[in-house]
Amino acid sequence: MGEEGKVTFAEKHPRLNFLLGLIFIVLLAVIVLWVIKFIFSFIGDGINSATLFLKKFVNNTDKVIVVAMITGSVSIVGVIFSSMIARVVDYRYNVKKYLV
């Protein structure tokens, strides 16, 4: 029996092949949905705990310190953001310089 005589599983049992494929797709979809639900619940719990911490922190801390911490956080985020943009611009400039 050469290559002509071999029959694949899908050709022998098309309905069973379809059923197995459907089961695998449904199982994969259930697993993906479960992982997404787990990730969102984890993020939601983190946001809830962060807001509770911030409420307690703001109630127990002087307002000047809270304003200073917010200002410092905004400054740090701005520096990180601007350094990332500077790297992207520098990379594009170097690519153009070497390609020309």
Image: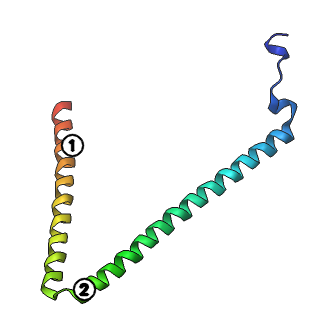
Q: Nearer the viewer, residue 15 or 63?
A: 63
> Residue 67 location in percent, x, y?
16, 82
Q: Residue at x 60, y 60 (%)?
A: 34
| Kind of element beneath mark 1 | helix
Left-right relation of 66 to 27: left
Q: Is residue 15 visible?
A: yes
Q: Residue at x 19, y 58 (%)?
A: 80
Q: Nearer the viewer, residue 38 or 82?
A: 38
- Residue 73, quarter of the rendered image: bottom left
Callout 2: 10 Å neighbours few (<14), some, many (20+)? some
Q: Amino acid at mark 2?
A: Val
Q: Amino acid at mark 1?
A: Arg
22 above or below 4?
A: below
> Residue 43 location in percent, x, y?
44, 67
Task: Compare marks 2 and 1 and give the one earlier in the sequence.
Answer: 2
Which dot marks residue 58?
Answer: 2
Residue corresponding to mark 1: 92
Q: Residue at x 82, y 15 (%)?
A: 4
Which dot marks residue 3?
Answer: none
- Residue 70, quarter of the rendered image: bottom left
| Kind of element beneath mark 2 | helix
Left-right relation of 95 to 4: left
Q: Nearer the viewer, residue 27 or 87?
A: 27
